[in-house]
Image (cartoon, rainbow, N blue to C red):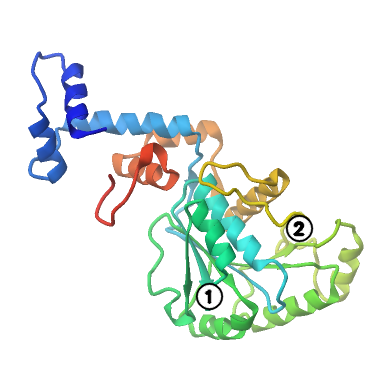
Amino acid sequence: MTGASLAQELTQMRDDGKETGQATVSRWLTGTSPVEPAVLCWLRELLRARVRQHGRSPVAWGGRRSLQIGVGNFKGGVGTSTIAAALAIIAGRELCLPTRHVSIQSEDECTAETLQAVGIHSSCVDIADLWVRQPEAGEIVVADIPRNVSNDLCDAMAAGSVRFDLILIPADFSSGTEISGTGKFLERLPDVSNAVFLHYPRHQVDLKFVELARERGFDVFSEQFVPFALPRSLDPEIFPSAPTGEWRNEDQFFLFWNLFENLLGRVDMELLEPDVAHRAIGKMSLDELLRLCFTAGIGGMAYDGLGYK
């Protein structure tokens, strides 16, 4: 909507016979004059209607300011990059949460391009710079931890310079090699209380992995295990290719959605049910609605570092 069309629409909405001129709107846009409170209220309710129409469910943060999730293992090839990308897409694209994907000291161009295609910011950073930019309020940070930096990252966590709310450790627990890598990673972690294990098998799920994992010291029925397996897709193309595109593998979408919801529950967060979400949207301020519209790409909303446009 241009300044002229906004002025015209506001004039038509007035019931006092007066006119809102284009010059008045221009002064609002440049910050020369404050926007009339009635106009701000109108914009707020317009955005509220857009958000409700978009059908996004807010998240209950449970008093938490932000959420940092690390995905890693001492064994390579266990699917950390795919899982980290999927969690970022669920958080940023599907739930419209401010989301940042980080690859530590090893950039995966394919993953970066996949995330960029759906509007998720991805960057490669050194361990020393990992938390230079502290997570913003309401932001989800998902870090892909490559095998070759796992030792150094564990040292940084032990020193207190790096922290995660959750460390997700995927592995095929029907593979002795991957169980061994998981055990080594667990031994190096300074705090195992926030470690979460995911059975991420390459083949069809069967119960043989339960006994093998138990023999190696892992109880798959413990609370630290995600209570379902997430079989890998045989098709490498599972993610949407555009901000509004469909997931190419619907089964994988639902599995990763359930995984993200399970992780939220472990830190006292939750996805709100539709009726609860509807009430939550009804209480949002203009700034909160602007942020949600921006992250969801509703109505062409953009952010230039200073404010929303």
Is residue 231 placed above or below 94 in the rendered structure? below
Quarter of the figure that contains the N terminus:
top left
x and y percent of residue 144 in the render? 58, 69
Res. 104 mark: 1
Hey, which quadrant is residue 40 in on the image?
A: top left
Q: Tell me the amino acid under the disc marked 2.
A: Arg
x and y percent of residue 94 in the render? 54, 45
Is residue 309 placed above or below 169 in the rendered structure? above
Q: Work out whether residue 192 or residue 4 is closer to the camera in this orientation and state it.
A: 4
Of the image marks 1 and 2, the number of the one nearer the N terminus = 1
Q: How packed is label 1: few (under 14 Cα within 10 Å), some, or many (20 or more)?
A: many
Secondary-structure class at tag 1:
strand
Quarter of the figure that contains the C terminus:
top left
Res. 21 mark: none
x and y percent of residue 286 in the render? 30, 39
Q: How packed is label 2: few (under 14 Cα within 10 Å), some, or many (20 or more)?
A: some
Residue in view at x 15 percent, y 20 percent: 11
Where is mark 2, residue-wise? 232
Given contact means CB atoms under 8 Å apart, are the residues at marks 1 and 2 in contact?
A: no
x and y percent of residue 92 in the render? 50, 51
Residue in view at x 33 percent, y 29 percent: 46
Residue in view at x 21 percent, y 27 percent: 5
Camera sees residue 268:
no
Left or right placement of residue 159 versus residue 261 in this view: left
Secondary-structure class at tag 2:
loop
Residue in view at x 50 percent, y 38 percent: 56
Q: Tell me the amino acid under the disc marked 1.
A: Ile
Is residue 126 placed above or below 100 in the rendered structure? below
Q: Work out whether residue 120 or residue 230 is closer to the camera in this orientation and state it.
A: 120
